[in-house]
Amino acid sequence: GTQLVILSACETGLGYIDNDQGVNGLQSSFLAAGANKIIISLWRVDDTATQKMMSYFYRRLFEDKMSIDDAFTQAQSELRLEYPQPYYWGAFIKICK
């Protein structure tokens, strides 16, 4: 019944390919355990940009009462204004069950 898991550390979305099971990794474990949505990173992330991204996301989610999807999209858009290079904001993706 967990609605959201956020793994904002470096490379939390990486896994290994198992020919029988697909891609296995940390995100697969959370989905199997019942998480509905997961936010992960695909590469090494900048600490300052990550802190800002998560602050923007939580502000939109809890103060502005946006949905998880809208808060995530808005947070990436806000971060993009300050850090236009995809390296800073593109590492984060949202996986839905």
Image (cartoon, helix red, strand yellow):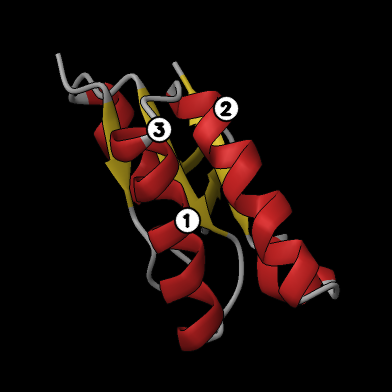
Decide if residue 49 is on the left or right side of residue 28.
right
Judge whether residue 25 can be spotted in this image: no
What percent of the width, then of the height, locates residue 37?
39, 27
Whichever of labels 2 and 3 marks the residue nearer the N terminus, that label is 3
Look at the image and tell me in which quarter the C terminus lies.
top left
Mark 2, secondary structure of its residue:
helix
Indicate the position of residue 16 as horizontal and vertical percent values: 52, 54
Residue closer to the observer: 24 or 52: 52
Q: Mark 1 and mark 3: span between their CA atoms?
A: 11 Å
Q: Nearer the viewer, mark 1 or mark 3?
A: 3
Q: Secondary structure at mark 1?
A: helix
Corner quadrant of residue 2: top left
The CA distance from mark 2 to mark 1 is 12 Å
Say which amino acid is labelled 3: Asp
Q: Is residue 29 above or below residue 26?
A: above
Name the residue: 52% across, 59% down: 14
Numbered badge on residue 64: 3
Quarter of the picture containing the N terminus is top left
| Residue behind mark 1 | 56
Residue 46, x across and y down, in percent: 55, 85
Tell me the kind of residue under disc 1.
Tyr
Residue position marked by numbered label 2 in the rendering: 70
